[in-house]
């Protein structure tokens, strides 16, 4: 039996990391299509069930398009059982009225605040929404030792779960005949031993939404041998686009063209292509008198990737020895700035940079 374990899809996310509304709208559409592609993959590969361990949606204001598309994916694949556990971002918007209107697909299995259990082939699938870290919550979970048991939870593993919102106490889950603990909430894939019998796993998010979610994103594919009760877990990279953050040290560059050359070398070494979402992070120390145009530099790469932005984290420096004997207006200006004890060295360098550009009749960058 094959089962997909996914989580943290965050459909209809605001995509605040994108700098313009059109890019954000486009990315929301891509994320919805990735969910559709995952369901198509499941149908093609003979997957029996899809476990959605929370945060299928991002906010209560789910679009009709998104709601209808998800319902269509579920209803049009009756051979696949969908197990949906709401996360901290999910709302009842998706579920409201489905039963009353007769629109709830029969292959959509839901969990509530109390432990629920479904049979899927020879596998028992349990789940419950977290609502406290007390022992009583975990005591309601009593899987049969003779069955293959999967438990779904959405929250963060913590040594002190009582002090963490949506905290999960692994100690309370050990020794409960769990073979696979299917988790959601943490957007980076990760796994470990639960006890002698079982393992726990976060599949990470299906698609990265910002530059804090770089790298491969996808889902876990479980291959379950019901006779040996062995569960083989494989991470399947599935995101439509890779999000990449690339650092380029441009220390010593005096012109924008020199910076472009250095940045191009850093980008060529990165694992990104034309479909990637890329942030270039400029680092290092620059002379305050250097010629630097971030907008021009960004434009040099913008057409090579689906989305591209530049973050300038460079530091400006000024060598005062070069101006100690300079009798020009520039020298007097720099000595005045550096003689101000209320300013930090970084603030002094920034003021000097803009002052020198003003003296030269140039626009500020």
Image (tube, rainbow, N blue to C red):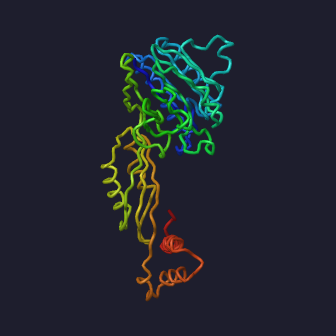
**What's the residue at 37%, 23% (across, down)?**
230
| Rendered position, 242 above or below 318 | above
| Rendered position, 153 above or below 319 | above
Q: In this image, 347 relative to 322: left or right?
A: right
| Rendered position, 59 above or below 351 | above
**The one of 21 and 29 positioned closer to us in this rendering:** 29
| Rendered position, 127 above or below 120 | below
Q: In this image, 319 relative to 107: left or right?
A: left
Q: In this image, 342 relative to 275: left or right?
A: right
Q: Position of residue 98 (x, y in %)?
A: 65, 16
Q: Position of residue 58 (x, y in %)?
A: 59, 34
**What's the residue at 62%, 41% (across, down)?**
165
Q: In this image, 270 relative to 136: left or right?
A: left
**The one of 208 and 64 positioned closer to us in this rendering:** 208
Q: Position of residue 147 (x, y in %)?
A: 46, 18
**The one of 126 and 136 positioned closer to us in this rendering:** 136
Q: Position of residue 40 (x, y in %)?
A: 43, 19
Q: Quadrant of residue 86?
A: top right
């Amino acid at each position: 039996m094959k089962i997909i374990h996914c989580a943290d899809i965050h459909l209809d996310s605001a995509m605040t990391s994108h700098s313009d509304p059109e890019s954000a709208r486009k990315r929301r559409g891509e994320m919805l299509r990735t969910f559709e592609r995952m369901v198509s993959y499941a149908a093609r590969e003979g997957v029996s069930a899809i476990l959605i361990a929370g945060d299928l949606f991002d906010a209560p204001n789910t679009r009709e398009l998104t709601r209808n598309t998800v319902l269509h994916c579920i209803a049009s694949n009756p051979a696949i059982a969908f197990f949906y556990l709401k996360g901290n971002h999910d709302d009842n918007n998706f579920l409201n009225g489905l039963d009353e209107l007769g629109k709830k697909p029969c292959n959509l299995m839901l969990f509530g605040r109390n432990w629920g259990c479904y049979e899927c082939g020879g596998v028992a699938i349990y789940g419950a929404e977290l609502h406290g870290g007390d022992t009583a919550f975990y005591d309601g979970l009593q899987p049969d030792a003779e069955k293959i048991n999967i438990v779904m939870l959405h929250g963060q593993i913590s040594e002190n779960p009582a002090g963490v919102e949506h905290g999960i106490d692994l100690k309370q889950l050990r020794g409960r005949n769990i073979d696979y603990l299917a988790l959601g909430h943490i957007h980076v894939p990760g796994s470990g031993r639960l006890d002698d019998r079982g393992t726990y796993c976060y599949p990470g998010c299906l698609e990265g939404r910002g530059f804090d979610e770089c790298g491969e994103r996808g889902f876990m594919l479980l291959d379950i041998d019901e006779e040996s009760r062995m569960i083989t877990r494989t991470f399947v990279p599935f995101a439509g686009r890779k999000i990449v953050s690339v650092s380029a040290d441009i220390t010593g560059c005096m012109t924008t063209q020199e910076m472009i050359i250095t940045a191009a070398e850093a980008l060529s070494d990165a694992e990104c292509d034309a479909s990637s979402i890329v942030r270039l992070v400029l680092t290092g120390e620059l002379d305050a008198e250097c010629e630097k145009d971030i907008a021009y530099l960004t434009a040099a790469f913008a057409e090579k990737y689906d989305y591209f932005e530049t973050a300038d984290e460079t530091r400006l420096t000024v060598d005062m020895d070069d101006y100690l004997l300079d009798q020009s207006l520039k020298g007097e200006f720099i000595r005045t700035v550096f003689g101000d004890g209320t300013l930090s060295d970084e603030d002094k360098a920034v003021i000097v940079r803009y002052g020198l550009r003003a003296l030269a009749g140039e626009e500020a960058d």
